[in-house]
């Protein structure tokens, strides 16, 4: 009894294989076509069922087939979730939904999704072609080229597929197929060459600029179209050509065991085109970095340390505000505090005062009898709230200014008031208490100057009090 398997014959060289064919044909009465099955190429052996032949002296007695789980036929109808009598419209609709679900751009770093996307694309490529579909329904394959390598896998001998999933996807849904789902135009070249990095800018402001809002100019590095190649990335007179390494997909397909993974093409860096003669000025990038003056709108009420994000061309700016302190205003969120100094007579009798406001000067009324450190609230006169509606309040703190030097008349008036003042805690210089419980100014008669001052004081007191 002689037992041979297709897996054992794969290791035979061509010369040994020829001898074995002749020997088997003579001794075991096999036909040459039957023996050729034992000498299938090593490359194809993983794609066909292992065949075991049993022979004796009189010829072939029996043959047995064994199909491993790896080589088992794929059910393309089950992969797309459709029935065998599904129409082309149903097939395309099923592919559309599954390709959107498992596309690598929405499942970054997920090998299972990449594998599923490959299977879905392979199933659609077979079932959408009527001839391949008939061959698949009859023989379980789509034809003699089923399992051959494609351009998307160039450079990787371990990957065998009849369809490039990315190329198929672009053919059906356009050059920027997946952008229809995500509304994002991903520039592989810009990402790889670092032009897409955001820039941080520190913007110095005065207190009034931050409080009222303004427009400031800053110079930033931005990406602009190369003036030499006009964005074509090639030297003048030359044009980019489609990348032959990735077949214009911008991605390479890599097979690692049972998993299929995709990465950016190493030849074109994901741009899908090959630049044979790169532009000397932009080095094949199509863009150059230059300085540009940008107008930065500063919102009213912005706080120190706040960051504003804005787009300047292709550049994303993060502007951090640095606000100088004010000598007059003190800030507490959207509220501001200021101090106002009033005279003694204003504090006693009341009046008005003019103070600085956020937008304009404000006239405030001083209530009679205002004491030092009295606080007045001006509703809605503070700063604008950046992240909400309305404005804060303006708080005014009163401070009474005490005169350091008095004229004779001022001193006489203050002394006259002191004599009439009640509930004085302690004593007052120059004022003595009488036996009747009243107060009296202590005049110094030895000084003629003081005598005249006393006379003047008497006249003033008489004129005021009678």
Image: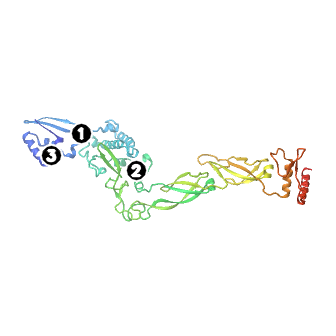
Front disc: 2 or 3: 3
Left or right of residue 136, residue 221 in this image = right
Disc 3 marks which residue? Answer: 12
SS of the residue under disc 2? loop
User: CA–CA distance between discs 1 and 3?
Assistant: 29 Å
Residue 13: x %, y % from top left: 14, 48
Residue 163 can be seen in this image: no
Q: Which mark is residue 240?
A: none
Structural distance between the alpha carbons of marks 2 and 1: 36 Å
Q: Classify 3 as above or below 15.
A: above
Residue 182 seen in the figure? yes
Say whether residue 426 is left or right of residue 197: right
Instruction: Please tell me how many numbered marks the rendered image carries.
Output: 3
What is the x, y in percent for residue 279? 39, 63
Taking depth in this image into account, of 285 and 248 the one nearest to the observer is 285
Question: Would you call the spot at circle 1 few (<14 residues within 10 Å), some (14-19), or many (20 or more)?
Answer: few
User: Which residue is more in the foreground, 169 or 294?
Assistant: 294
* Residue at 90% in and 50% down: 465
Q: Are marks 2 and 1 in contact (CB under 8 Å)?
A: no
Rendering colour mode: rainbow
In the picture shown, does residue 312 fall above or below 95?
below
Mark found first going from the N terminus, 1 or 3: 3
Q: Nearer the viewer, mark 1 or mark 3?
A: 3
Q: Which residue is label 1 attached to?
A: 139
Q: In the rendered structure, which disc, 2 or 3, sits on the residue that comes first in sequence?
A: 3
Separation of residues labelled 2 and 3 (CA atoms): 49 Å
Residue 266, percent from left and from top: 34, 54
Q: Which numbered marker is on residue 176?
A: 2
* Quadrant showing the N terminus: top left
């Amino acid at each position: 009894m002689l037992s041979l398997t297709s897996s054992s014959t794969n290791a035979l060289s061509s010369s040994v294989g020829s001898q074995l064919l002749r020997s088997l044909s003579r001794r075991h009465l096999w036909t040459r076509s039957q023996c050729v099955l034992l000498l299938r190429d090593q490359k194809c052996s993983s794609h066909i069922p292992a065949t075991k032949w049993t022979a004796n002296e009189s010829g072939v007695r029996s043959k047995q087939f064994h199909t491993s789980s790896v080589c088992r036929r794929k059910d393309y109808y089950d992969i797309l979730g459709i029935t065998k009598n599904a129409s082309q419209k149903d097939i395309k609709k099923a592919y559309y939904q599954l390709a959107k679900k498992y596309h690598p751009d929405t499942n970054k770093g997920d090998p299972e999704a990449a594998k599923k996307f490959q299977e879905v694309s392979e199933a659609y490529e077979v079932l959408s072609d009527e001839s391949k579909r008939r061959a698949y329904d009859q023989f379980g394959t789509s034809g003699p080229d089923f399992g051959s390598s494609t351009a998307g896998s160039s450079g990787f001998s371990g990957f065998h597929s009849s369809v490039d999933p990315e190329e198929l996807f672009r053919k059906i849904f356009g050059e920027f197929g997946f952008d229809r789902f995500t509304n994002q135009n991903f520039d592989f070249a810009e990402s790889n060459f670092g032009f897409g990095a955001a820039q941080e800018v520190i913007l110095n402001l005065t207190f009034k600029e931050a409080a009222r809002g303004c427009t400031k100019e800053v110079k930033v590095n931005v990406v602009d179209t190369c003036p030499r190649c006009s964005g074509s990335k090639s030297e003048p007179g030359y044009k980019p050509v489609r990348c032959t390494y990735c077949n214009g997909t911008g991605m390479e397909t890599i097979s690692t065991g049972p998993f299929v993974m995709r990465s950016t093409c190493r030849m074109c860096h994901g741009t899908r085109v090959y630049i044979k003669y790169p532009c000397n000025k932009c080095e094949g990038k199509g863009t150059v970095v230059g300085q540009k003056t940008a107008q930065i709108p500063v919102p009213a009420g912005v706080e120190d340390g706040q960051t504003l994000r804005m787009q300047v061309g292709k550049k994303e700016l993060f502007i951090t505000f640095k606000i100088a302190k004010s000598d007059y205003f003190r800030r507490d969120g959207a509220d501001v505090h200021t101090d106002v100094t009033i005279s003694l007579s204003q504090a006693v009798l009341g009046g008005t005062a003019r103070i600085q406001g956020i937008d304009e000067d404000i006239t405030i009324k001083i209530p009679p009898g205002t004491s030092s450190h009295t606080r007045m609230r001006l509703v809605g006169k503070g700063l604008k709230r950046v992240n909400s509606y309305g404005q804060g309040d303006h708080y005014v703190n009163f401070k009474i200014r005490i005169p350091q030097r008095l004229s004779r008349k001022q001193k006489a008036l203050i002394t006259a008031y002191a004599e009439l003042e009640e509930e004085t805690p302690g004593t007052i210089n120059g004022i003595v208490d009488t036996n009747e419980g009243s107060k009296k100014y202590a005049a110094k008669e030895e000084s003629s100057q003081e005598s005249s001052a006393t006379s003047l004081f008497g006249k003033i007191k008489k004129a005021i009090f009678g």
